[in-house]
Image (cartoon, coloured by chain):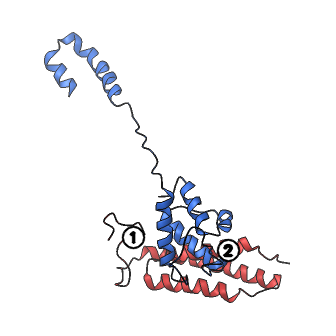
Amino acid sequence: MAVAPTRLQVLALYKQFIKNSKQFNNYNFREYFLRRSRESFRANVALQKPEEVARAFADAKEELGVLKRQAIISQMYTFDKLVVEPLDSQKHTPSPTGV
Amino acid sequence: MFRSVLRTNAPMALRRAAPIAVRVNAARFMMPTRNYSAANKLTNDAVQTRVLSVIQAFNKTNSVADVSAKTSFHQDLGLDSLDTVELLVAIEEEFEIEIPDKVADELKTVGETVEYIASNPEAL
């Protein structure tokens, strides 16, 4: 019988999903996978039975494999940035001029 | 360079010995020197402003106006555990560090996060 994963394990898996989703080069795919990761974890928030949790965890693990692979493939086919994306890095360092 | 100088000026007898001497000299010049610069230490204040701007950019937070060091992710910002993970990933990216899962689970307030980052030597 499958053992239910601990809270830490689930959170670690979620972190992997978010991190790998952010690797996508293409804005639309990136946002889609971020959205999907959030939704799929939220959909299972209320699961109580250990078997169900274990099954959801195992499914998510398999999907993480797909996500990782696709994220790497997406980096091989780069696109120009869309107008909605900031061109500079996402750093929040305050600029020296204070502007 | 040295060899050509020697060849024009030195008598025949010297020319045989010269290459070794030149090599020794060159070796002394090429001794690697390393200049260690002091680590770029982040101050708590600098870390805090950056953490706050990350929180601000994290659009799920409901009230960003009065975020201070004592602000708790869960109670004050209304983030659940999944949101907190996401916020910490954003903070990790900002400082280019990796927060271990166990530590991340312990970080419950802005102040704790700021302290952890300031104490992390790899934070940029």
Residue at left 52%, top 79%?
B64
Q: Nearer the viewer, residue B124 or A85?
A: B124
For the N terminus of chain A, give its image quadrant.
bottom right
Chain of the residue under label 1: A
- In percent of width and height, residue B112 lies at 61, 63
Q: Does any portion of residue A65 appear in the rendered image?
A: no
Read off the residue under disc 1.
Answer: A89
- In percent of width and height, residue A71 lies at 51, 76
- In percent of width and height, residue A87 lies at 34, 75
| Colour used to depict chain A in the structure image | red
Marks 1, 2 in one chain: yes
Q: Residues within 10 Å of mark 2 (few under 14, many from 20)?
A: many
Residue at left 47%, top 67%?
B50
Chain of the residue under label 2: A
Q: Quarter-wise, where is residue B16 in the image?
A: top left
Residue B103, label in figure: none
| Colour used to depict chain B in the structure image | blue
Which amino acid does the dot numbered 1 rest on?
A: Ser
Q: Does any portion of residue B33 appear in the rendered image?
A: yes
- In percent of width and height, residue A59 lies at 70, 82
Secondary structure beneath dot 2 equals: helix
Q: Quarter-wise, where is residue B117 in the image?
A: bottom right
Q: Residues within 10 Å of mark 1 (few under 14, many from 20)?
A: few
Residue at left 55%, top 86%?
A35
Which amino acid does the dot numbered 2 rest on?
A: Leu
Question: Do labels 1 and 2 touch, CB within 8 Å?
Answer: no
Read off the residue under disc 2.
Answer: A11
Secondary structure beneath dot 1 equals: loop
